[in-house]
Amino acid sequence: MTDILTTTEVELLRRQVDRLTAELVDMQRQNGDLRELAARQDERLRVVQSMNEAAYKEAYNAAAGPHFCPGKPFGARPRPGIRDLAQGDAS
């Protein structure tokens, strides 16, 4: 057994190295493309999420949720209703 490679073995190794180098270059290109895509998707998500939150806030403010009402502050006794008037509890 010798430590010297034959010409055929050297050529075979050279082809393998060339193939692996080409694969590496291709994978690095794909990696760059995927990083760019991820950055674009991240920005798109930020914009859409901001729009969604604004729409939710607008809908919430228009139709639901507790709101401060200066005419009836929290803790004030409500106006008497028909039942209260019937029972004579109108204060």
Image (cartoon, helix red, strand yellow):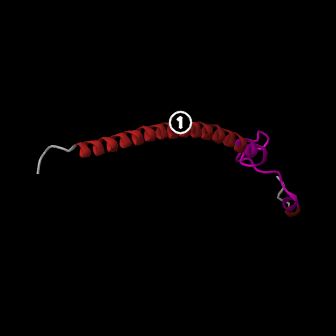
Q: Residue 67 location, x and y as percent?
A: 73, 44
Q: Which residues are magenta?
A: 57-85
Secondary structure state at the residue bearing disc 1: helix
Residue located beneath label 1 in the image: 36
Decide which of 85, 43 is in the foreground and name it: 43
Neighbours of disc 1 within 10 Å: few (<14), some (14-19), many (20+): few
Give coordinates of residue 39: x percent, y percent: 54, 36
Residue 67 visible in image: no
Q: Is 6 left or right of 60, judged from the image as shown?
A: left
Q: Is residue 19 left or right of residue 32?
A: left
Q: Position of residue 89 (x, y in %)?
A: 82, 58
Decide if residue 18 is on the left or right side of residue 51. Answer: left
* Circle count: 1
Amino acid carrying label 1: it is: Glu
Q: Residue sitting at 78 percent across and 48 percent down?
A: 63
Q: In this rendering, would 65 be left or right of 15?
A: right
Could you tell me what secondary structure mostly forms the magenta stretch?
Answer: loop
Q: Is residue 62 magenta?
A: yes
